[in-house]
Image: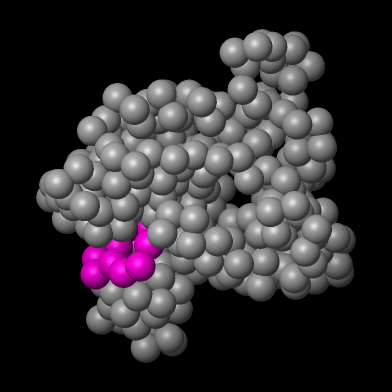
Amino acid sequence: MTEILFQQIQQFYDGASGLWEQIWGEHMHHGYYGSDGQQAPDRYQAQIDLIEALLNWARVGEAGEILDVGCGIGGSSLNLAQRFQAAVTGITLSPVQVQRARERAAQAGLTTQAEFQVANALAMPFTDNRFDLVWSLESGEHMPDKAQFLQECYRVLRPGGTLILATWCHRPTHIQPLTVDEQQLLAAIYRVYCLPGVLSLPEYTAIAQRLELQNLRTADWSTAVAPFWDQVIDSAWKPAAIWGLLQAGWTTIQGAFALGLMQSGYRRGLIRYGVLTATKHH
């Protein structure tokens, strides 16, 4: 089942990444609209603001070697490479994304600083204790085994290094279990975006607590990022986007129709945006 899922994820991003970049840009993640969600930066700036907000929140001052887990076409990787004058390694399941990320690194003059490869985040091809910063921006939701994923992030993190995880979640369920209606909405989102399922932020916290991590902090940033889906939906109905969807094929078209599912999930309080940071003990 896992191999089939990984193939679906690869095919989804192989098919959709070119259109996303054409319509939206190199960052394949939410934007940040202020802690109250009321700021109104343009969509590109909002995505840069999210990177900035995460680094500030996690108190990352410097990093010599960085791993970007689920790097897309290199948006965060190149930003981090320039920001910290660091060596950044990006991994993704999509060969199309790797190729485009390498092209973008060359265009930015960052070939010696940023490298990209196809790799499985549940079995990373890196030695233990290698990276100063392990950065996972909206890739955790694709992982079929969240505990194994966090274990791998922990393994490759250098003692004293920082983990930053931002991921799609569902609401906490310890007081009120998910209703049938909520389960159906989540199932529809999972199907379209090739997700094996998401967890609540308290469940991620519990996994992280089983690792020897220090300074563990989490937060729910749903309010700050939810306006993103309104902007994406607005952009999806422009002529260039519609034409691109028709060329990109059915999987990408389904992804576009599902934008409203994510918007609805946020409005209902079902979809949450969880952030987690911690450091590895010395």
Residue 44 appears left or right of 119: right
Percent coordinates x, y for residue 126 in the rendering: 18, 51
Does the magenta portion include 22?
no
Is residue 117 visible in the rendered structure shown here? no
Does the magenta portion include 62?
yes
Residue 74 appears left or right of 37: left
Check the image and report above or below for 19 versus 130. below
Judging depth in this view, the residue of 152 and 64 nearest the camera is: 64
Check the image and report above or below for 213 versus 147. below
Is residue 76 visible in the rendered structure shown here? yes
Q: Quadrant of the N terminus?
A: top left
Percent coordinates x, y for residue 110 in the rendering: 34, 83
Q: Bounds of the magenta span? A: 60-69
Residue 28 appears left or right of 35: left
Q: Which residue does the image show at 81% across and 31% down from the upper left?
A: 268
Percent coordinates x, y for residue 4 in the rendering: 44, 31
Q: Which residue does the image show at 55% across and 61% down from the upper left?
A: 53
State the image quarter where residue 197 is shown. top right
